[in-house]
Amino acid sequence: MSDDEHPDPTEPAGVRLAREIRRRRTAASLSQPQLAQKIGYTRQYVSLAERADHNLPSMEIVKAIDKTLGADGHLVMLREDAKADQRARRDDIRPAGQLVSTRPSGLQPSSISPNLTDSISAADFSARAGQFFFGAEIDVRSFPAEADERVFCMVPSGFVDDPFVRRPRRGLVVGVMGGRDETRLFGLDNRHARRRLTGLPPDARLLMTKAYVLDDLSIGILWAVANLDEALLDDDAALADARGRLAAFEGLPRSTGGQDIAADLASVSRMWLGSDFCARHILRHTGSFGDAPMFWTREQRGEEASTWLFFAHKFDYLRRTTAGRAKQEAPVRRTFCIPDSTVMDSSRPERVLLFLAVALMESFGIRVDIATDPEYGAVEGFALDEHRAVVANWAGTDGVWQVDLTGDRPRLRTFRDALGYARSHSPLTAVTAHGRLRDLAEYLQLDWTWLSGRCAELGEYGTDGLAHPRSRLLSLEGLDRACRFVGDTQTEH
């Protein structure tokens, strides 16, 4: 009899799942290696599935074990319960006092008072720190708003001359509409607010855009742009100097950039420097690739992946690596390693950024695969063809970058094995690009109807009015392209 026929209601479902897998395997007189062989995985995967102190095993592995051990869906049900437990715990630890009903967790005010408009006016928006982001402040001025088909913000008379909208520093004009329990907020970059008010009567209302409602999509964008912008502006001269000192490494097939090269730079600036160097290394060596190359990328979270959307050189890199390959029979492919545990640990705005980075790839005709097993997180970033690999890493390295050019057969075999496994086990199984994006939204636990509709809105209006970059190294071209591509699904049927 299974222990789970009389489960302890206080015991996490993940603990019951691990114990039940182990009990059923033992009852079937199978060792871990024997069960692993039957389901087509390594022993390590079975061992991890039986450990309650580890991340949940993937649904794919649980289904294979369930079928092999004749559990009639019982293990699958336990895994679903464990997943629900994880979601509940994540909701419980979200910060209180969020601004909108969707409870975005990437950008939040320091306090909320009963008078919501006054509270937002008195507080800065805090774009929280992350693994690379130091955190940034966005100054806010908020005013009541009203709407018919449009949104109007009731700014004070003469607001066009207010220092808040005339200074170069980032600021956000927020229109507040509704009561405390059903409040909707709309944002507009302070520079755009000045442009919209210029030439109008002093008492004119500020016309805002419904597409700029502050939800998990727009807040994720603001979180990333504010953090990237502030760091790159602060380091502008030092970053230009550091890039100029890299000439000695440019022609080398193999090099490593240590932290001493960028010792005085913020982590975001080191990200930019490493990403830029790796992009140029790959472009130098993939021009002669015959077949459509296969890429492996190391970004796992929205924070790192947001660089695809906002670093200007990465948009150019995608354009150049796909130029002339769109009509090839075999598509360019790129694999991300995004473990289930990483999804669970990420806020929804960050998962939206990760989704948009993949959407940008697909918009260029790049077919994206997802490796969900955490063990593949250590695989190097590379571009692979028949005979060699161009290796390039900036994410997850000890220094600023690590690049190589190799034809070593064991190393190439390792790369091909990783690509092959990811391709055969990817949760993105649809034939079309938009179908794969639906699959990705499901995997990242994002509502597809909401997300595709919001992307369609932002794709129509563009995002510059919401999050205009100040740094010359940033661009919204990739973000807008990704939004338009996802939004195209709204007009397909």
Image: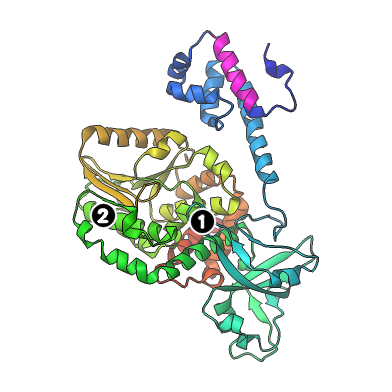
Q: Is residue 81 above or below residue 209?
A: above
Residue 18 pos. (x, y %):
59, 23
Q: CA distance from mark 1 to mark 2?
A: 30 Å
Q: On the picture, is 371 further left or further right than 138?
A: left
Snapshot quadrant of residue 126: bottom right
Q: Name the N-terminal-most of marks 1 and 2.
A: 2
Could one spot residue 63 in this view of the protein?
no
The kind of residue tagged 2 is His
The label number, if any, that marks residue 281 in the structure image: 2
Element at label 2: helix
Residue that numbered label 1 is attached to: 486
In the image, what residue occupies the spot 53% across and 25% down? 49
Q: Is residue 285 above or below residue 310?
A: above
Q: Which residues are magenta?
A: 15-28
Q: Looking at the figure, which quarter contains the N terminus?
A: top right
* Closer-to-camera residue (32/359): 32
Snapshot quadrant of residue 72: top right
Q: Looking at the figure, which quarter contains the C terminus?
A: bottom right
Q: On the picture, is 390 further left or further right than 438?
A: left
